[in-house]
Structure formats: C-alpha cells, structure tokens
Amino acid sequence: MKILKYISIFILFIGAGYYGLVFMAPKSIEFQVNEDFDAPIDKVFQMVANPAKLTQWNSTMDKVTYGGKYPLMVGDKYEIYFKGDQPLILSRTVQGFDQNHRLVTHGIIPNYFVWNEDIRFEALDSTHTRIFTKITLKSESLRTRLLMYAKETHEKNVSQNYQKLKKVLKR
C-alpha cells in the first residue's frame, strides 16, 4: 500500500512539473535573423517574396499554393504545406509589399501558431544585398506552448534556410 502511495505522489509531481512548464512557457517569442547575400537586391527579393520560389530554398516546405500572380499585393493570400508526418498548412496574408524593399506577412496554422514576418531588404551595392528578418511566433494552444522554449532552434532553422538560398542564388 505504501508503494502505491509513493507511485501516486511521484506521478502527481511529474504531472505538476509538465503543466508547470506549459503554463510558464512564453506565449510568444520574437527574434531577428540578418543575412548578407552576394546577389543583386532584385534577385534576392524575388526569391524571398515570390511564393513560387519558396520551395527552391526552404527545406521545410513541401509545396506552396497561391493565385499565381507576382508581384504580390497587400491582401494576397497563399498557403504553405510543410513536410513531415503531421500535415501542417500555414495560411499567409501579405500585409506589406514594397518591391525590393520590404515584405510583411501574417501567417497562421489554426490551433497551432501564428508566424508573422517583417523582412527588409537593403542593397549594399549593385551585387550585394542584406536582409533583416524579424519574426514573431505566437502559440495558439497549450499543446504548442512548449515550442516557445525553442527560440534558438527557430533562429537556426531560418538561418539554415538562408544558407540554402545563398547556394541557390549562386547557380
């Protein structure tokens, strides 16, 4: 009987610890990734802002569906289908578009998270471009709150995708 009591207390502490982690996790995170590219600003901007080009350099994306027109306009929507066992579809809405200067999007995976991006482009000279990517990630449910602890992982993933973009731009 004592053993059952100790097992129950142990399970209670494990459950309390887990829910403590979930409830103490931040509801949102914000981070910035900056990257320099050895390519003209118009080429970099098109690869980042044109939904048809995203799967060429973003390793997490399976496919992108949208109306097919480019350049985008404020209010345009497109969907990003991610690779993996669980089908995740990010619905994005363009909130700001300034050709070769800025792209702002609001994305949501219902009951999962909101992913907002504000990407600014700067021509360093005629053949070099710097982009500043500010991302805000907000959990939409308790089951995804633990993802907010992985800020460094999200930063690393964005940076790795930009490294792949550099390789694509060199072709």
Image (cartoon, rainbow, N blue to C red):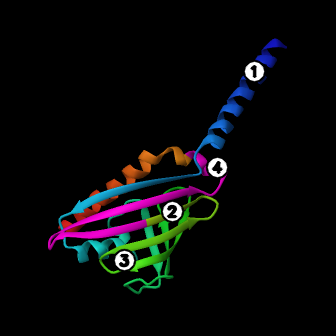
Q: How crowded is mark 3: few (under 14 residues within 10 Å), some or many (20 or more)?
A: some
Label 1 vs label 3: CA separation? 56 Å
- Where is residue 37 shown, x and y percent of the image? 22, 63
Of the image marks 2 and 4, the number of the one nearer the N terminus: 2
Instruction: Answer with left or right where residue 15 lies relative to residue 163.
Output: right
Which disc, if any, is residue 115?
2
Q: Name the residue under label 4.
A: 143
Which numbered mark, 2 or 4, is in the foreground of this view? 2
Which disc, if any, is residue 7?
1
Give the quarter of the image for residue 54. Answer: bottom left
Which numbered mark, 1 or 3, is in the foreground of this view? 3
Give the quarter of the image for residue 167. Answer: bottom left
Label 2 vs label 3: CA separation? 18 Å
Quadrant containing the N terminus in the rendered view: top right
Instruction: Answer with left or right where residue 51 lies relative to residue 22.
Output: left
- Where is residue 159 shown, x and y percent of the image? 33, 54
Task: Give SS at disc 2.
Answer: strand
Of the image marks 2 and 3, the number of the one nearer the N terminus: 3
Task: Give SS at disc 3.
Answer: loop
Q: Who's the residue at 34% across and 58% down the image?
A: 161
Q: Mark 3 points at which residue?
A: 50
Residue type for callout 4: Arg
Task: Give SS at disc 1.
Answer: helix
Of the image marks 4 and 3, the number of the one nearer the N terminus: 3
Of the image marks 4 and 1, the number of the one nearer the N terminus: 1
Tell me: residue 151, above or below residue 170: above
